[in-house]
Amino acid sequence: QLQLVESGGGLVQPAGSLRLSCTTSGFTLDYYTIGWFRQAPGKEREGVSCIRRSGGSTFYADSVKGRFTTSKDTAKDTVYLQMNSLKPEDTAVYYCALAARIGSCLRERGYDYWGQGTQVTVSS
């Protein structure tokens, strides 16, 4: 059974760091693109980062470039989102998603499966 489970969210102070994990099962991680998305209260869900299935290229939204890093460990079937220099505006529920074939991996369209999300709150 295909599954994606996010973890690692929590409460952090501004300028702090968190590492989110997207633990996968039921498929071969290298064959799929994994995206990270977030949704803040009252806002639409937006693409944050993604790591493509072919070659592992990574892409980032302008709002997180230089602060967030996506990586994967195929031995652990896990994709990570390292978030540094966090800001209050990064507060949101963060989701990971899987796509077999996709154009722009920062857009929701094309993602087939989603995790349940993990809350990240940046506040002093």
Image: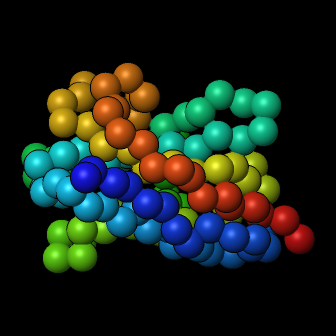
Tell me what residue is drawn at x 24 percent, y 44 percent. 33
Q: Is residue 117 above or below residue 101?
A: below
User: Which quadrant does the C terminus fall into?
Assistant: bottom right
Residue situated in front as seen by the camera: 94 or 116 = 116
Left or right placement of residue 86 versus residue 114 in this view:
right
Residue situated in front as seen by the camera: 88 or 3 = 3
Farthest-out residue, front: 1
Tell me what residue is drawn at x 51 percent, y 43 percent. 37
User: Which quadrant would residue 113 be assigned to in this image?
Assistant: top left
Looking at the image, what colour scheme do you see?
A: rainbow
> Could you tell me if residue 83 is visible in this image?
yes
Left or right placement of residue 62 versus residue 97 in this view:
right
Tell me what residue is drawn at x 24 percent, y 76 percent. 76
Q: Please state the horizontal and vertical placement of residue 56, each as a whole percent of the image.
A: 18, 54
User: Which quadrant would residue 59 be assigned to in this image?
Assistant: top left
Tell me what residue is drawn at x 40 percent, y 35 percent. 106
Q: Please state the horizontal and vertical placement of residue 39, each as a whole percent of the image.
A: 64, 40
Left or right placement of residue 14 versus residue 3 in this view:
right
Q: Is residue 118 above or below residue 124?
A: above
Left or right placement of residue 10 versus residue 14 in this view:
left
Q: Please state the horizontal and vertical placement of residue 72, each as a whole percent of the image.
A: 27, 66
Q: Please state the horizontal and vertical placement of residue 117, each as a whole percent of the image.
A: 56, 52
Q: How many marks?
A: 0
> Could you tell me if residue 48 is visible in this image?
no
